[in-house]
Amino acid sequence: MDIFLSSLLVLVFTSLQLSVVSRIPLNHGKADILLLFVIAWCLNRQARKYYIPVLLAGGLISFISSLPFPTAIISYLVAALLTRALISRLWEMPVFSMLLLTIIATFFQHLLYIVIIQFQGITIPLLPSLQAITLPSIFLNIILAFPIFLIVQDAQKFVYQEVEND
């Protein structure tokens, strides 16, 4: 059931990414709600098969974007592995973990994109691209991190049948 729901959420968030979120730029930066979904999904310890939605999201974005094929898969996989490595240390504060991992993963993702584009022969100055694209993207991702976290947490409660403490 978790594979079905996570795959369905990947498709929904991909549609939202392409139709709504990509139309809301800040400077030249854009939010990546699939990255936020990957982080939020991997924050739950019960999500044992977290790699399936990660690979699906990375594959979809790799197919859609103009970057070379493994770039999005690598960035989402690194974000998922980093999240899984940190949940044992920051588990008591999942919202703080979500925000911290959002900043780190977005920065890594954009750095990876810049390096891959450099290898393709396109010259991009590092500092101006970080200022004009990465920092606004981090800001937008931080704004959207909490709503995505709540949506994913509610979906995981349905799947994993967690009981709320009142």
Image (tube, rainbow, N blue to C red):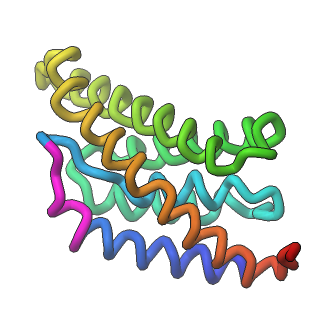
Percent x, y of residue 21: 26, 64
Q: Residue at x 50, y 47 (%)?
A: 76
Q: Nearer the viewer, residue 60 or 96?
A: 96
**Is 26 left or right of 108, judged from the image as shown?**
left
Question: Looking at this view, is 11 or 153 the one in front?
Answer: 153
Quadrant containing the C terminus in the rendered view: bottom right
Residue 51 spot, x, y in % from top left: 65, 57
Residue depicted at x 71% and y 77%? 2
Question: Compared to 125, does 165 lie above or below?
Answer: below
In the image, 142 versus 126, the foreground residue is 142
Does the magenta portion include 37? no
Above or below, comparing residue 117 to residue 152 in the picture:
above
Q: Check the picture and name the quadrant holding the N terminus.
A: bottom right
Residue 72, image x and y in percent?
A: 40, 47
Left or right position of 123 against 8: left
Is 21 part of what is drawn in magenta?
yes
Name the residue located 65 percent from the left edge and 37 percent from the top edge.
82
Q: Residue at x 33, y 33 (%)?
A: 110
Count of numbered circles in the view = 0
Q: Is residue 100 left or right of residue 81?
A: left
> Magenta region: which residues?
19-26
Give x and y (percent) for residue 146: 51, 58
- Does 24 sit above or below residue 10? above
The image quadrant that residue 153 belongs to is: bottom right
Up the image or down, 7 lies above or below 66; here it is: below
